Structure formats: C-alpha cells, structure tokens
C-alpha cells in the first residue's frame, strides 16, 4: 500500500515504513502485514511469564514477537471427568482471535491440558493453522529459574510444530519428544542445526 505525503499520526504501529525520494516527491509505504509471532495469555497469567518469552522466541524464529490481549478463561474446554482442559478446543479459539499480521500464534495457559489419545499434554499445535498452546500446570517447579526454562522449552517446541517441524531424534534438541518432565529438563531451549535449517 503506497501513498504520497506525510504518515498519518493515527496509523497503526507494528509495521514497516519505507521512504523513497523522487525529486520533490516523498513516497511513503506501509506494510500492513509484516509477519510476527503473537503471544496470548489465556485466562489469568502473570505478565512476566510472557515477557520472558519475547526475546528468545524472536531470536529462535527470526520474527518480531508481540504480546496481545488475553483470551478469556477456557471454561468451554474443561472436561469435568478428567479435570483437564482439551487443548484442541483452545487452539480453535486462538485461531479465531488471531490478528492478520500474526503469522504464528502461541497461547499460554496456566492449566492442565490433554489430548484425547493422551493422559496429558504439555502443549499442542496445528501446522495448518500455525497456532500452538502450552499448559503450565505440569511444568511447575519450586525453582523459578527451572520453571521459566521449562516454559521456554515448551513454547519453542510447540511453535516449532506450528512451523511444520516433527519430533527430532536428538535428545538435546528442543523438538525431541517429552514423555515426562525429565525429558524436558534434559533438552536445550534451542533448535538443533538440522531443525533450525527447516524454519529459516
């Protein structure tokens, strides 16, 4: 989208301005859909949890990361028999709330997730919809640093799936499958060289 003249002061932020000079004419352009990763709290969530994810996710995936408005508590996804929340139903709400410039979206929920075929899930992702959600209930630790590290690992892991990455055979890669917390703690909060090539 291009126009002549000054940038309107009320124009939305978050895009990229380009300026070119042709004689006396100043041409300004605005890319309304510069790709970003959207982060969304789901229900009540300590703001610092998302704030700690912004920089490392931006470095890992090479996109700007923006924290958006919270989604309401997912009562609709609660299974009273299991006392857990169905991750796929939360993913559907994330997709509906996605903004046009959000190439990928990650929801962070302080609850216990499940997938129908599993006893629990640290998270779930959709490659087709480029969306992901993680649950924090099973990542908790008395050590705040360990808790924060687990959150980052699961955030990168599920976003990796939204990029189309499969589980990696390397135990230290963030894309390796975690069947238990010990597996998560063993992994590094980074893509191995082979997985990194697939998202760059």
Image (spheres, rainbow, N blue to C red):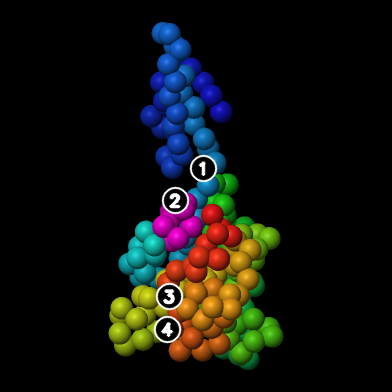
Residue 167 drawn at (x, y percent): 60, 75
Q: Is residue 13 above or below residue 87?
A: above
Q: Is residue 82 left or right of residue 39?
A: right
Per the model, the C-alpha gap separating discs 1 and 4 is 34 Å
Q: Is residue 191 magenta?
A: no
> Which residue bears the numbered disc 4?
185
**Looking at the image, which is closer to me, 32 or 164?**
164
- Identify the element where label 4 is drawn: helix
Q: In this rendering, which labeled residue sits more in front, label 3 or label 2?
A: 3
- Write down the quadrant of residue 8 in the picture: top left
Sequence-wise first label, 1 or 2: 1
Q: What span is in magenta? A: 57-66
Q: Which mark is residue 34?
A: 1
Per the model, the C-alpha gap separating discs 1 and 2 is 9 Å
Any part of residue 117 in sight: yes
- Identify the element where label 1 is drawn: loop
Per the model, the C-alpha gap separating discs 3 and 1 is 29 Å
Mark 1 touching mark 2, by CB under 8 A? yes
> Which residue bears the numbered disc 2?
64
Sequence-wise first label, 3 or 1: 1
Identify the residue at horizontal 68%, vertical 60% (top origin).
128
Q: In this rendering, which labeled residue sits more in front, label 3 or label 1?
A: 3
- Write down the quadrant of residue 11 in the picture: top left
Q: Is residue 60 magenta?
A: yes
Quarter of the image that includes the N terminus: top right
Q: Is residue 193 above or below residue 154?
A: above
> Which residue bears the numbered disc 3?
188
- Identify the element where label 3 is drawn: loop
Q: Is residue 76 above or below residue 2?
A: below
Identify the residue at horizontal 30%, vertical 80% (top origin).
144
Per the model, the C-alpha gap separating discs 4 and 2 is 27 Å
Dot 2 crowding, Cα within 10 Å, few <14, some 14–19, many 20+: some
């Amino acid at each position: 989208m291009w126009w002549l003249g000054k940038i309107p002061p009320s124009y939305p932020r978050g895009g990229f301005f380009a300026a070119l000079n042709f004689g006396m004419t100043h041409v300004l352009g605005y890319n309304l859909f510069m790709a970003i990763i959207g982060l969304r709290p789901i229900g009540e969530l300590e703001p610092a949890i998302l704030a700690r994810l912004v920089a490392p996710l931006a470095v890992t995936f090479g996109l700007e990361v923006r924290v958006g408005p919270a989604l309401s508590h997912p009562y609709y996804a609660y299974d009273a028999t299991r006392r857990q929340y169905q991750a796929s139903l939360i993913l559907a709400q994330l997709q509906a709330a996605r903004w046009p410039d959000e190439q990928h979206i990650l929801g962070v929920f302080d609850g216990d997730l499940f997938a129908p075929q599993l006893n629990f899930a640290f998270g779930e992702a959709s490659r087709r919809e480029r969306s992901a959600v993680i649950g924090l209930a099973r990542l908790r630790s008395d050590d705040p640093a360990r808790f924060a590290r687990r959150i980052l690992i699961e955030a990168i892991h599920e976003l990796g799936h939204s990029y189309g990455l499969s589980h990696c055979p390397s135990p230290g890669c963030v894309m390796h499958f975690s069947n238990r917390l010990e597996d998560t703690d063993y992994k590094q909060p980074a893509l191995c060289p082979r997985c990194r090539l697939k998202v760059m």
